[in-house]
Image (cartoon, grey):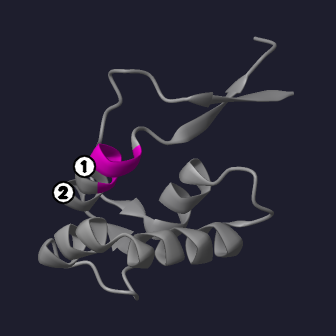
Amino acid sequence: MNNNEPAAEHYSINGFKYFSELAKEYFPDLANASSASKKMRKRIKANKTLNEQLVAAYYTSQTIDVSPEMQLIIYRHWGPPHIDLPTNV
């Protein structure tokens, strides 16, 4: 069984990440990566400041790979993503 927890204070950004992977981290309760990606793109578009900052970092509505700079921008707006941690180790 997994427990949905926010990432630690010392969240680390290590290189590029697939948009769908990052979307699932921010929206883990959605059924699949496609649903999470659609929701994340919609939320980005709805937030003018976030969208402008991401566009300045070369984000488009077709971005597949999220750069460390883009991840940092998103982190600053939304905080750390959620990660699944095993509850029985």
Main SS class of the magenta portion in the image? helix
| Magenta-highlighted residues | 74-78
Q: Which residue type does callout 2 highlight?
A: Glu
Residue drawn at x 40%, y 79% is 45
Which corner quadrant of the image does residue 27 belong to? bottom right
Residue drawn at x 59%, y 77% is 38
Judged left or right of residue 45, residue 33 is: right
Q: Are marks 2 and 1 in contact (CB under 8 Å)?
A: yes
| Residue 84 placement (x, y as % from top left) | 67, 34
Judged left or right of residue 76, residue 86 is: right
What secondary structure is marked by label 1?
A: helix
Any mark on residue 69, and which? 2
Position of 59 relative to 13 (above/below): below
Furthest-top residue in this view: 89
Q: Nearer the viewer, residue 48 or 23?
A: 48
What secondary structure is marked by label 2?
A: helix
Which quadrant is home to the N terminus? top right
Any mark on residue 72, and which? 1
